[in-house]
Image (cartoon, helix red, strand yellow):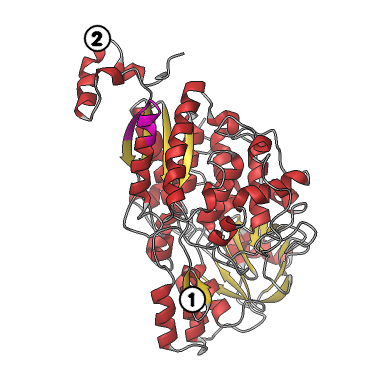
Amino acid sequence: MSDNLRSQVVTQGVQRSPNRAMLRAVGFGDADFTKPIVGISNSYSTITPCNMGINELAQRAVAGVRNSGGMPQMFGTITISDGISMGTEGMKYSLVSREVIADSIETVCNGQSMDGVLAIGGCDKNMPGAMIAMARMNIPAIFVYGGTIKPGHYNGKDLTVVSAFEAVGQYSAGKIDETELIEVERRACPGAGSCGGMYTANTMSSAFEAMGMSLPYSSTMAAEDAEKAESTEKSAFVLVEAIRNQLLPRQILTRKAFENAIATIMAVGGSTNSVLHLLAIAHSIGVELTLDDFETIRARVPVLCDLKPSGRYVATDLHKVGGIPQVMKMLLVHGLLHGDALTITGQTIAEILADVPDTPPTNQDVIRPWENPLYAEGHLAILKGNLATEGSVAKITGVKLPKISGPARVFESEEACLAAILAKQIQAGDVIVVRYEGPKGGPGMREMLAPTSAIIGAGLGDSVGLITDGRFSGGTYGMVVGHVAPEAAVGGAIALVQEGDTITIDARSRALHLHVSDEELAQRRASWKPRPPRYTTGVLAKYAKLVSSSSLGAVTDLGLS
């Protein structure tokens, strides 16, 4: 079989002379037209520290493709910085960008008949966006993580960008002065790389490694370390070999791969956003995956890693003590990983992990021993009830009280909620409701990192609940419940909550309940009217029109066939 199975339609035959003429202008010679054309999807930008080091990695990928007998063609895709857009109208574009990124990679690779693609991403949405595209196209593909940021330091503590968000709450509560606030701000993000805790970027990189779509150990490497560039070049060699062997995503992204990813995410204490993204990737590859699957796996997988946001350590600390392979080997030994799942290297998970110790190093406490986990069960709980009949997602690590009942404090936007918290209008025992921030209602499911960090900073993290049809940053922790579905914009029960209603969040029984009778809810529903669209033109309007429920991954191509 020819190595340029797809690209030969633009490189072979007399009728393709004009096509070859164009390719000669970008560096092709006579001997190159029989080589596989490999797309290098480069999400480099100076918009965010997450992506500012990626161009150097892309150049290493180009070299790796050339040295392994392929022809690289680099192209760009976008990124949105969640950390910079957080708390603003711009954050509505964040989840939307996942679809734009997936569409752009699919468009270039299929439009140019590429034989395979190496995608490099370093921010929350260009990672799942790239994987969605890979799943859709089903051409040989590998994902390269741009790498994690190293921690900042102040007063003997490791800092991440979440430290700055929490410092705002501490300052507003009078716990720190302006000088300390500015010092945290100055030191929180010391260089290139994605947010340092087990936030969404590091969660998704860990998931992709567990699924076999990235190389071992690559998901926790620091962006600025030499091994990151070396791993990128090695990824290019592996991809060209996969092209020769026609090893395709559908052979790797199986049901077993998704179960391995979920188990790994639970063990490392990953982000709630992983639920949304894995559902979307599964939809793109045609694997049946539901919210209930997360709950099933959660119940049998312990949290083994003591990582931020609710823990003490950052991703580079995890890397030093064995990284994701060490966590995966522990899961494999205890029957919680599918060792026969295939990886992009052509090896199985069990073969990849063969030389990894069964137990973590004894001179560290980043990864706990199996018999002494941080928590006996996973931390991403799926809550259901009359407030979330389709489901909702709660991160329950670091929560001292697994149940809270209190009066609803209702806000129609994130901004109104944050203003109330900073004005000290929220009291212990309150349950905050932030609605019309869902996939359609926002649109775009803004993350609520500013309000949740302000709650933590004010010292209310263990006594105030927050529910929303929007999302949470991977940096969020506390008694918070997101992805409430159905959302307010489509008439979900969250739209019917009134100020002062009693709401119960019960993580132990996995329930989210509004203490209002069915009859009263029916009366409220009869008088409820949908709001007019917030946007009538442009990408947000198109997204709101097409997007599905968050319980299905907030995808935009549901039911098209």
- The location of residue 73, given as percent across then percent down, is 32, 33
Q: Residue at x 40, y 20 (%)?
A: 6
Is 158 left, or right, of 398 in this rendering?
A: left
Asked if residue 308 shows in the view, the reply is yes
Q: In the rendered image of this protein, does residue 332 appear above or below residue 169?
A: above
Q: CA distance from mark 1 to mark 2?
A: 65 Å
Q: Which residue is mark 2?
A: 14
Q: Residue at x 57, y 60 (%)?
A: 198
Q: Residue furthest top?
A: 14
Q: Could you say which disc has been placed on residue 213 in the image?
A: none
Q: In the rendered image of this protein, does residue 119 appear above or below residue 68?
A: below
Which of pointers 1 and 2 lies earlier in the amino acid sequence? 2
Q: Residue at x 63, y 71 (%)?
A: 478
Q: Residue at x 53, y 55 (%)?
A: 202
Disc 2 is placed on an element classified as: helix
Asked if residue 550 shows in the view, the reply is no
In-front residue for pair 72/558? 72
Mark 1 neighbour class, 10 Å CA radius: few under 14, some 14 to 19, many 20 or more:
many
Callout in the foreground (1, 2): 2
Magenta region, residue range: 64-73
Q: Which residue is mark 1?
A: 418
Disc 1 is placed on an element classified as: helix
- The location of residue 362, given as percent across then percent down, is 71, 61
Kind of residue at badge 2: Val
Q: Residue furthest right?
A: 371
In-front residue for pair 223/387? 223
The magenta stretch spans residue 484 = no
Kind of residue at badge 1: Leu
- The location of residue 493, given as percent across then percent down, is 63, 61
